[in-house]
């Protein structure tokens, strides 16, 4: 996690030591990066090798993030970006293509990279460092070409970014290892070789273990950066700031005061042409043991002793270990049917007409430790729901004594702290006050904070921090092998029920709040989901 201006560089994790090694392939004629913002230092020089240079991830997220880092002057002049993909093409064609898509995203108000107009100087800086290399990921050819290129450049720091579909993870890492491309320099100041692995990291416990074993037979754990892009979001990182930089919350952040927690990642979009991927994955695998468990980890973890990567990751790993294995009784699956926003899932391209893949999943999760025993964490995610809303709502227990029982007030609205991740960025707090007038009456109000009211909002795609941290060697926001496996272990009984049965999948109308069975899951405990389409608290 990148340091704030309040955090002296000397407090950064030991692993973030900057190798003294330089990449000697720096284009001398390239313009210098603009000056970096106060308190931030540019990343060390490195070559970023992107496998999957022609893919969506490169275009939509990696390039915008690199551009934003260049705008902020956080990349070293010695940086070089090699894009590997199958299919011959000229570097200039790849560069023009990326430029065109950046311009389109920048102009698109619905895009996370809505920068308006591109800063052409920053783009030139990135553009001049791009180089395209054609190659098949499952042949040795491209790896020997890469080796030759990096050897000519006398090595240097290299990040290999696997922006490819998961079936290529193993063959690419194996070939990198066998070609000697993962060999790092000796000592703290030696050159680094890092691999960034995208999700999905396995599809269950056995496949995640197998992938970890395979990768770790060619690289050390400290070289592997497993990405969960939710952790790149400022609003997600801010969960720790809200909890640990304020004296108000932490004393009540425990079972004695907290009634329940709801974690929602609701989307209005459908599968958007990803039918093939989604048919094999489903909403549960796609979102629960990774994104939603990561949010749960941020909410539930104990305060670490420091902000060192290992200190933070150890505390998060403790939570993953404390998650009580989920059973079919704790989980509800749903699938969207035809509704006002569009066709049903089964009518989507590349989806079987009798598909039983879930596009919605809700779960009740317990974290069995001293702080959280007995507090339900309700998680839900789904496509084609009533609203786009990623947020965490922490509901407090009622006050212990109904002081106002003789007044017309017979029930108080519970206090709820909501941390809004996307698309709204901020927090809100529901609480009670006396309403004006001669009668002692209590009414609910909401106090809210919006990032945009305090900070200039950036067209941040979430990968900026992750790329920058990877260059610095800061693994705080990346997932360790053990945590990934523990998360998969917690959902094993849902993915592979012991009785061999399959989870029932309930229909819900596109544009709705989800299946009724998900409401029943909470109703059993006397709870209800917070509506996705929330009416604003009425101002009288
Ligand atoms: C991805 C999932 O990891 O996260 C997608 O594969 C999902 O299905 C996406 O739409 C949600 O991320 P965000 O940042 O748009 O909320």
Image: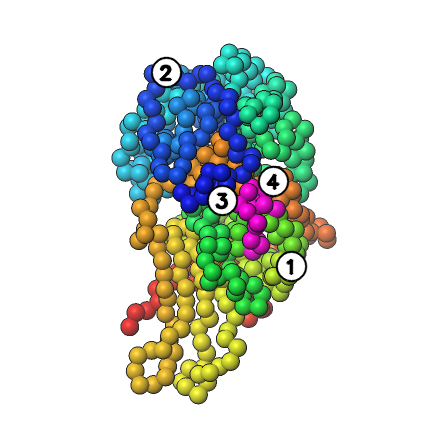
Q: List x then y, in percent, for residue 347.
A: 47, 45
Counting residues from the N terminus, which is met first, the one under dot 1 or under dot 3?
A: 3
Q: Secondary structure at mark 1?
A: loop
Residue on which disc 1 sits: 369
State which mark lies toward you, 1 or 3.
1
Q: Secondary structure at mark 3?
A: helix
Query: Does residue 417 appear in the picture of this structure?
Result: yes
**Which quadrant is home to the C terminus?**
bottom left
Instruction: Using a 10 Å C-alpha cutoff, classify the residue at mark 3 as few (fewer than 14 neighbours), some (14 to 19) or many (20 or more).
Output: many
Gap in Å between the C-alphas at discs 4 and 3? 13 Å
Counting residues from the N terminus, which is met first, the one under dot 4 or under dot 2?
A: 2
Gap in Å between the C-alphas at discs 1 and 3? 24 Å
* Residue at position x 32%, y 52% in the image: 454
Q: Is residue 366 magenta?
A: no
Disc 2 residue: CB within 8 Å of ligand 1: no
On residue 231, the disc is: 3
Query: What range is drawn magenta here?
Result: 300-314
Residue on which disc 2 sits: 28
Gap in Å between the C-alphas at discs 1 and 2? 56 Å
Gap in Å between the C-alphas at discs 1 and 4? 21 Å
On residue 480, the disc is: 4
Instruction: Using a 10 Å C-alpha cutoff, classify the residue at mark 2 as few (fewer than 14 neighbours), some (14 to 19) or many (20 or more).
Output: few
Counting residues from the N terminus, which is met first, the one under dot 1 or under dot 4?
A: 1
Q: Are marks 4 and 3 in contact (CB under 8 Å)?
A: no
Gap in Å between the C-alphas at discs 2 and 3? 35 Å
Q: List x then y, in percent, for residue 203.
A: 61, 41
Query: Does residue 163 appear in the picture of this structure?
Result: no
Instruction: Using a 10 Å C-alpha cutoff, classify the residue at mark 1 as few (fewer than 14 neighbours), some (14 to 19) or many (20 or more).
Output: some
Q: Secondary structure at mark 2?
A: loop
């Amino acid at each position: 996690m990148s340091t704030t201006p309040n955090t002296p560089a000397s407090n950064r994790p030991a692993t973030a030591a900057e190798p003294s090694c330089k990449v000697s392939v720096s284009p001398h004629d390239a313009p210098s990066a603009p000056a970096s913002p106060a308190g931030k230092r540019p990343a060390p020089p490195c070559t970023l090798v992107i496998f999957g240079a022609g893919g969506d991830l490169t275009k939509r997220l990696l390039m915008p993030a690199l551009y934003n880092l260049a705008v902020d002057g956080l990349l070293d002049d010695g940086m070089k970006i090699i894009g590997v993909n199958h299919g011959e093409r000229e570097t200039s064609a790849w560069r023009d293509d990326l430029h065109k898509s950046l311009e389109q995203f920048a102009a698109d108000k619905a895009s996370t990279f809505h920068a308006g107009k591109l800063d052409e100087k920053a783009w030139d800086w990135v553009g001049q460092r791009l180089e395209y290399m054609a190659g098949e990921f499952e042949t040795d050819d491209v790896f020997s070409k890469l080796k030759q290129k990096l050897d000519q450049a006398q090595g240097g720091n290299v990040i290999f970014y696997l922006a490819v579909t998961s079936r290529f993870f193993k063959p690419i890492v194996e070939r990198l290892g066998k070609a000697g491309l993962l060999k790092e320099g000796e000592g703290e100041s030696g050159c680094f070789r890092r691999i960034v692995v995208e999700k999905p990291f396995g599809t269950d416990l056995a496949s995640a273990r197998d992938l970890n074993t395979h990768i770790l037979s060619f690289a050390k754990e400290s070289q592997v950066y497993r990405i969960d892009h939710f952790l790149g979001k400022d609003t997600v990182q801010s969960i720790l700031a809200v909890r640990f930089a304020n004296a108000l919350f932490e004393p009540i952040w425990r079972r004695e005061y907290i009634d329940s927690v709801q974690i929602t990642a609701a989307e209005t979009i459908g599968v958007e042409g990803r039918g093939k991927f989604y048919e094999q994955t489903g909403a549960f695998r796609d979102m629960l043991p990774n994104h939603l468990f990561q949010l749960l980890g941020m909410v539930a973890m104990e305060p670490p002793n420091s902000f060192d990567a290992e200190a933070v990751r150890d505390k998060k790993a403790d939570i993953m270990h404390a998650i009580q294995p989920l059973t079919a009784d704790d989980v509800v699956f749903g699938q969207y049917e035809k509704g006002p926003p569009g066709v049903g899932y089964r009518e989507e391209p590349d989806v079987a007409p009798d598909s039983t893949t879930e596009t919605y999943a809700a779960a009740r999760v317990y974290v069995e430790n001293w702080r959280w025993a007995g507090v339900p964490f309700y998680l839900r995610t789904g496509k084609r729901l009533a609203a786009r809303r990623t947020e965490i709502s922490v509901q407090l227990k009622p006050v212990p004594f109904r002081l106002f029982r003789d007044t017309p007030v017979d029930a108080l609205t519970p206090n709820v702290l909501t941390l809004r991740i996307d698309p709204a960025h901020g927090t809100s707090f529901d609480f009670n006050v006396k309403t004006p007038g001669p009668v002692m009456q209590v009414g609910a109000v909401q106090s809210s904070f919006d990032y945009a009211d305090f900070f200039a909002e950036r067209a941040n795609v979430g990968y900026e921090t992750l790329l920058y941290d990877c260059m610095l060697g800061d693994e705080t926001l990346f997932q360790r092998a053990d945590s990934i496996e523990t998360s998969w272990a917690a959902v094993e009984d849902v993915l592979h029920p012991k009785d061999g049965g399959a989870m029932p999948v309930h229909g819900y109308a596109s544009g709705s709040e989800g299946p009724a069975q998900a409401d029943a899951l909470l109703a059993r405990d006397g709870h209800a989901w917070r509506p996705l389409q929330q009416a604003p608290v009425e101002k009288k």
